[in-house]
Amino acid sequence: MSTAAAFQHLLIEDRDAVRIVTINRPDKLNALNREVLTELRDVFRAIAEDPSVRVAVLRGAGEKAFVAGADIAELAALSPTQARDFSQHGQRMMRGIELLGKPVIAMIRGYALGGGMELAMSCHLRIAADNAKVGQPEINLGVLPGFGGTQRLLRLAGRGATLELCLTGAPINAQRAFELGLLNRIVPAEQLEDATLALAAQLAAAAPQALRGILDAVQIGGECGIDAGLEFETQAFAVCTSTNDMREGTKAFLERRKPVFRGD
């Protein structure tokens, strides 16, 4: 995908069926402003519509931060009405990632704070370097998380951890974040890119409709009561059985070979 020129703050790279999206504001520790949010919205909409892309990786440029938070200079100038619109703009973009229907992996190096932590939590999987630090420090600015932090933290780590992180504003290290369920994996910093791209390649080789079914069953069905969630799972399972990929997968298993999923 040769669309880097279309974005002021993002770098885009394709590696086979994996699209790597890099937030490229290292001088600002990749802070999120309205322009970055809009570009992220647009690039993930394009990913959703592109059948050649099966997995996305989201990362920040440089060694210091995934995303260190929202752009404080922009935040400080917002009126209450503008703040509401900014919050909703970020929430819609991150909800779009969450409901993309394709796995998105956050590759976290350095700081993932405030809006950066909220962005990482909207991704389906999070892999972090062992030197990463995450947190919701908005209380120190006299506000609360505005891009979904209270809600996704609650669902990932529970009420106690959410209140601790949001009320104190203190960042935590990668090991503590892993223990709380906020990170899926921790790897040495020098291995972060290789480990993330290896996982992305593994997921990209899977059946796309099955990936989508799992994501939807967990992300959407998981918010329902158990009976509605089970029915959601049943319907997704039935859809998968109608695909050529299901026939390929079962045939490959019986023939004791690796399946080749085409996405149909």
Image (cartoon, grey):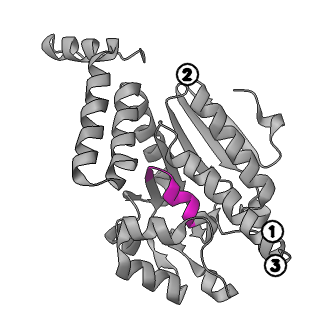
**Dot 3 corresponds to which residue?**
76
Q: Which residues are magenta?
A: 117-125
Residue under pointer 1: 82
Q: Mark 2 highlights which residue?
A: 52
Disc 2 versus disc 1: nearer the observer: 1
Kindly state the secondary structure of the residue where label 3 is placed.
Answer: helix
Of marks 1 and 3, the one in the foreground: 1
Using the image, determine if residue 207 lies above or below residue 34.
above
Quick one: which residue is furthest to the right in this view?
77
The quarter of the picture where residue 136 lies is bottom right
Q: Is residue 205 visible?
A: no
Work out how far the residue at label 3 is from the one at label 2, CA to CA, in angstroms: 41 Å
Cβ–Cβ under 8 Å for marks 2 and 1: no
Residue 91, horizontal then vertical, whole percent: 62, 58
Residue 7 x, y percent position in the rendering: 80, 41
- Label 3 neighbour load within 10 Å: few <14, some 14-19, many 20+: few
C-alpha gap between disc 1 and disc 3:
11 Å
